[in-house]
Structures are given as C-alpha cells and as structure tokens.
Amino acid sequence: MIERRVAVTGMGVVTPIGIGVEAFWKGLLAGRSGVAAVEHFDASGLPARIAAYVRDGDALDAWRRRLGLEPGDPRSLLFALAAGRQAHDAAGWRDELGGPRVGVVFGSHGDKLDMGRMAEVAYRARNGGASAIFPAAFFERYCREFRGHPLTRLLPHHATLRLARMYRAQGPACTIQTACTSSAQAIGEAFGMIRRGTVDRAICGGAECIVSPNHMLMFALLGVLSTRNDAPARASRPFDGGRDGFVLGEGSAVLVLERWDRARERGARILCELAGYGTSCDAYRLTDEEPEGRGAIAAMRRALEAAGLTPGDVDYINAHGTSTQMNDRVETLAIKTLLGRRAYQVPVSSIKSMLGHAVSAAGAIEAVACVLALRDQTLPPTINLERSDPHCDLDYVPNAPRGARVDVVLSNSFGFGGHNDCLVLRRCTG
C-alpha cells in the first residue's frame, strides 16, 4: 500500500489567551496565563472557582456576526466555526477544493443541557401533553426556552456537520469523543485517511466549552482540579512540586491536512509535515493512568514508527502535562523510558500551564503550538515551574520561551479511560 505524505496547510484557534494563530502564539511566548476567577456564572460554594475560559467581548461578537450565528447557538459551535474559518482562509481554500475527496474528523463533547435543566425539560414536556408519552413539540419548545436553540443543535456531531458544510466536504464525516485525547485522535484519524488514500484533504481538530457548574463540580469531586482560587494565574503548574490539580479550560483548534503532492500542485503554503500518529489504550482504570506508563510509551513508539523515525530523532516534546500529581509523574517516566539516556537532553513543555486543560480541544490546540514551534524554531514555556519534584526532573523549558533547532516534534495527549494519542510533526524538507 502506498503511504502518502501529509501536509498541514492551514490552522485556526480560539483560546483564552488569543483568538487567531498569531495572537495565540504571541500569548504563549509571553507566558501569559488565561486562568481567571469564574465570572460568567456563580461559582461560590464550588471547591474550584477558577478556569481558563474565553471572555465574551468584541472579538467573539465579530466572529458570531461573520459566521451568521444566532445568539442561542452553542459557544462550542462558535469556537469550532471561528477556528474552521481561520484555517479555511489560511489554507487558501476555494470552492473547487471541496467534494467527495474531502473528509472531516472532529473531537467534541458537544453542547449539553445541564442535567438539572434536562430533567426539568423532560418533566415539563411529559406533563404538557395529553398523554404520558413525551410529545416532541413540547420537548422542542422547552429546549428553546432553556437554551434558545433547536434540539438538533444539542447533537454531539453538530459542529462536524457544520464544518463539512463550510468546506463542502462530502467525504467521511466523523465525531470522536475520547475525553482528553479527542482532538488529537481526530487529527490522527484524518492523517490516516489521507495516508491510505481515502481522501485527499481533511479538516480536523476539536472544540470544547464545558466550563460549567456541573463539570466543575464533577471534576472537583474526582479530586483532579486545582483549588488555588486565590492565585488563578499560578494555579496550573505542570511538573511543579507544588501542583494540586488541573484547571478546566475551553477553546478550539482546526487544522487543514492535504496530500503533500496535491498541496504542492496547487501552490499551497505548507506549514509542516504531519508525519506520524500512534494510539493505544491502557485498559487499566477509568480515571488513572497505568502507573508505569506502558500505554503512553506504546503510543509514542507507534507514532514514531509510523513516521519512519526513532526516539533519537525527537527534538522536542509537547507534553500532555496536566498539572495533576499522577499524570505529570507518569508522563515523565514514560518519556524517560522512550528516550533512555537522551531524556535529559530533549526539552519538554506543557502549554496547559497557560491554557488550562481544554479537554476535547486540548490536543488540537497543542498541535497548532507544535507547528508554530517548528516554524519559528522556538519552544513555548512551561510557566509556574518554581519548585522541583524529584519525580519530574526533565528539562521542562521553565517560565520563558527558548530558541532551539527543532526538526521533529512529538505531541502527547493522554485521557480519562486510558486513551493515549500521539502525533509526530516534522519541519518541511521539500
């Protein structure tokens, strides 16, 4: 089977530290934290009252108008389509580039009614009709009342279908939900479609918008959120000895992938090569990584093998780096096992220190950062790294960006349920 090379030709992002690729990159290199006290709902009484969320304002309003979205459309859809339009424009997309040879793979949690509201909607719908069976019209009516948009917009694959319409993509359209690895897996599966020859182009990435009372309480009950409420900007501190949990985040990133030869033929600006993808499952516990990092190691090795590379070729690792005690320790161990003696020579950093954990969107946002690191030969920092941890003793690019020779980047995403998805990106070589 012929394995085709895959080019990255367009990117777009919506993040708490910047909307648009250059604003996002500027924020990362400045070490800017997007974490703040929650203000868009009453978080009093919650153990964690901080999050990295995209502030409402002129920039979001401008995107909502440009995309023709209604006030009741989900924020996650706004994020997805804004990132998608940016990627569309950056790739130089034209109508004739759409069609049946274009696919969409997107990672998203979808837009959900809060459970309490959903229960009330269902109860009122049942009692609003003449029989004990839920009348669809009443259910639709009350969904509109609570969230201002039709029931169809609550479907988890709604953003996928809207992106397909934007790009006139008539090939495969898939929605992936594997928790924290969703968008990394979406990129990997899109990569596989192009490599196998299923499609010539793919739109991939993810969006997340779950900074809500229910989700913050759920993650707090699991004991994984930082409760550093008095110092939000210092709360997300991957690999630091004083870390006490991750900070919930939100945002979106979309990448345009193309067959390398087709991108060259149309004169597209190739940003880098997506060279490899590896995936695995720990098959261990729902909320804990396998303690020796075996699944993470397997995914990293498979990604490098798919790229035709070895661990000795890796110049930089963009870590999953959530700021939880176990994740950071296990990921460090996995990197040491993968790289052996080189582990202390290869820089590793986590941009979750600035963005919090955007869950379904995290892997795609981090992939964009990797492309930019290759472009500018600059590594984004891990901020808030102040106190050493004997279990986390690698070079985490502490607190300031660093110029470096970077040809091969490994981007890690590890998620609840033991999902492991890793991407290899390579600087353009012709």
Image (cartoon, rainbow, N blue to C red):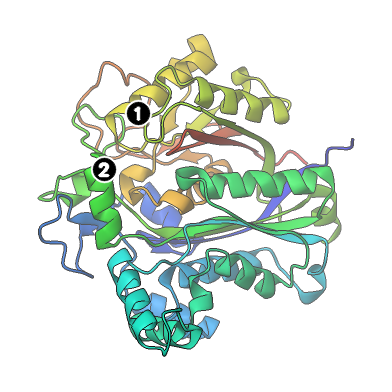
Classify residue 251 as left or right of residue 34.
right
Label 2 environment density (alpha carbons within 10 Å; few <14, some 14–19, many ≥20): many
230 relative to 38, above or below: above
Classify residue 321 as left or right of residue 69.
left
Q: Disc 1 marks which residue?
A: 328
Q: Evaluate whether residue 267 shows in this view.
A: no
x, y percent for residue 269: 71, 57
Label 1 environment density (alpha carbons within 10 Å; few <14, some 14–19, many ≥20): many
Between discs 2 and 1, the one toward the N terminus: 2
212 relative to 416, above or below: below
Q: Which residue is at 33% across, 49% downward?
A: 356
Distance Cα–Cα, label 2 vs label 1: 12 Å
Q: Which residue is at 46% across, 16% downward?
A: 336
The residue positioned farthest toward the front in the image shown: 131
Q: Evaluate whether residue 60 shows in this view.
A: yes
x, y percent for residue 295: 52, 25
Three-letter code, disc 2: Ser
x, y percent for residue 83: 53, 65
Q: Label for residue 4? A: none
* 356 and 105: which is toward the camera: 105
Q: Quadrant of the N terminus?
A: top right
The residue positioned farthest toward the top in the image shown: 341
Q: Label for residue 236? A: 2
* 365 and 19: which is toward the camera: 365
Three-letter code, disc 1: Asp
Query: What secondary structure is found at the residue carrying circle 2?
Result: loop
* 289 and 241: which is toward the camera: 289
